[in-house]
Amino acid sequence: MGNSLRVEGLCAGYGAVQVLDRISLAVNDGETVTLLGTNGNGKSTLMKCIMGIVPPSSGVIRATIDGVEHDLAGRAPEQIVDLGIALVPEGRRLFPRLTVEENLLLGAYRRSARAAIARNLAFCFATFPRLAERRRQLAGSMSGGEQQMLTLARALMTAPKILLIDEPSVGLAPILVIHTIDKIRELKESYRLTVLMAEQNFNQAIRIADRGYVIVHGRIEYEGRSREDLANNELIHKLYMGL
């Protein structure tokens, strides 16, 4: 049994503005795939389409969870989460007036996650000791790096099989970016997750990605079949390295 994601010919936008133009990509069981692109090229819109937040105008979105295929198009976000797909959103989106522990417990509303609340909470606190130290602190009073830890941990409380991560490095100091990316790799291996990560920090993304795609103006312009392919691609050199 596996957990994978497949998008084919996806078009979507906001009103008359089309953002995604015939996007196709795949994330195979156990992979970490990065979606590279600078701001405004459609990364977040794609994530929202997969999660049912933005309805596609055409195309296919299918997820295989524990070997069973599901059509995601037309499903409500809570139904998609209930299948075992979780999103770590850009900008963190925490409940600032709730404590660390209360934010984590809100992540465990999925039916199959409720039975494992104690185990998942213990795992989150072991993985992020700072959260354990501050479990009664209000989320809104924490630093940006601490809030990013909390956002990752909250997603894990849903007991996901597929994890979508949108711009985890945004707003963080360089040393915290490195720490966050390392934690994503650790969590993926510990939970045996399938991961799609949208990121514009190329050097950090390819440290943990098995392969990836480059999105430019809402289109997939390049598919790298390995991190070496990504590192040696001329388009990436132009977009990210000024070469």
Image (tube, grey):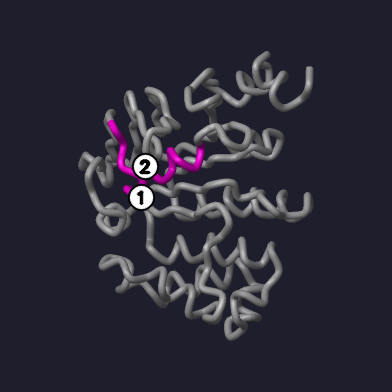
Q: Residue furthest front?
A: 16
Marks counted in the figure total 2
User: Magenta segment, which residues?
Assistant: 43-57
Residue 233 screen position, x and y as percent: 65, 16
* Residue at the image position 78 percent from the left and 49 percent from the top: 174
* Residue at the image position 30 percent from the left and 66 percent from the top: 110
Judged left or right of residue 61, residue 240 is right
Judged left or right of residue 228, residue 189 is left
What is the spatial separation of the Cα atoms under label 1 and label 2, in whole angstroms?
6 Å
Q: Is 41 drawn above or below residue 52 in the view shown?
A: above
Instruction: Specify few, some or many for label 2: CA neighbours under 10 Å numbering under 14, 14-19, or 20 or more.
Output: many
Read off the residue under disc 1.
Answer: 53
Label 2's element? helix
Seen from the viewer's position, the closer of residues 44 and 18 is 18
Q: Is 124 drawn above or below residue 3 in the view shown?
A: below
Identify the image quadrant of the C terminus.
top right
Q: Amino acid at mark 2?
A: Cys
Residue 12 screen position, x and y as percent: 36, 34
State yes or no: discs 1 and 2 in contact (Cβ < 8 Å).
yes
Label 1's element? loop
Instruction: Specify few, some or many for label 1: CA neighbours under 10 Å numbering under 14, 14-19, or 20 or more.
Output: some
Confirm whether the magenta stretch covers residue 45. Answer: yes
Q: Is 130 drawn above or below residue 53 in the view shown?
A: below
Read off the residue under disc 2.
Answer: 49
* Residue at the image position 27 percent from the left and 36 percent from the top: 62
Residue 208 screen position, x and y as percent: 61, 39
**Residue 108 has which mark?**
none
Residue 130 screen position, x and y as percent: 66, 73
Confirm whether the magenta stretch covers residue 54. Answer: yes
Identify the image quadrant of the N terminus.
top left
Q: Amino acid at mark 1?
A: Ile
Seen from the viewer's position, the closer of residues 37 and 125 is 37
